[in-house]
Amino acid sequence: MGDVFHKDCPAREVLGHLAGRWTILVLTALLAEPLRYHQLRTVVAGISDKSLAATLRSLQQDGLVHRQVGTGQPPSVTYSVTRLGRGAAAALDPLLQWIRANAVEITARGDE
């Protein structure tokens, strides 16, 4: 365990990956159930194909999301959270709940 305030702490890289706008939404969406790509794109409204693909690739590389390719033509691809991903999503979910509860008040302050 390192000091996240130190510039060379490896936790900073992980924080950078998890702090992305789409990362939090994709990860928490997958916490509920495994989803196919098009389902994720529907659940996470507004995400572009490019952003979704990049987010999923990053989450896979970090070991937070598993990509399962099924048999069949065309092959079906399903994404799910790994054990590590469940821990991250569970930790991020309260933040997402807080944001939902306070978003109107926070954005209204920007109009002042």
Image (cartoon, grey):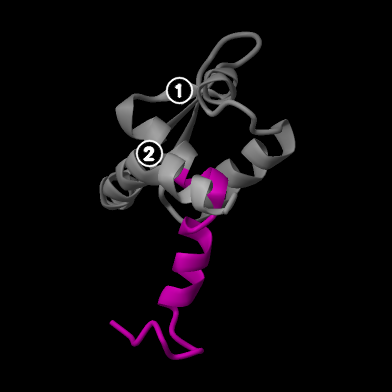
Residue occupied by mark 2: 100
In the displayed structure image, the side of residue 13 where residue 1 appears, left or right: left
Residue at position x 64%, y 33% from top? 47
Q: What's under tag 1, amino acid-wise?
A: Leu
Image quarter where the C terminus lies is bottom right
Q: Is residue 11 above or below residue 89?
A: below
Residue 99 in the image, given as x and y percentages of width and height: 38, 46
Q: What's under tag 2, amino acid-wise?
A: Arg
Q: Is residue 32 above or below residue 105?
A: above
Residue 74 in the image, given as x and y percentages of width and height: 65, 11
Q: Of tags 2 and 1, which is closer to the observer?
A: 2
Range of magenta residues: 1-24
Q: What is the number of callouts on the image?
A: 2
Q: Which mark is residue 80?
A: none
Q: Residues within 10 Å of mark 1 (few under 14, many from 20)?
A: some
Q: Residues within 10 Å of mark 2 (few under 14, many from 20)?
A: few
Residue 10: quadrant of the picture: bottom left
Residue 90 in the image, given as x and y percentages of width and height: 26, 46
In the displayed structure image, the side of residue 21 where residue 11 appears, left or right: left
Q: Is residue 97 above or below residue 19?
A: above
Residue occupied by mark 1: 35
Circle 2: element type: helix
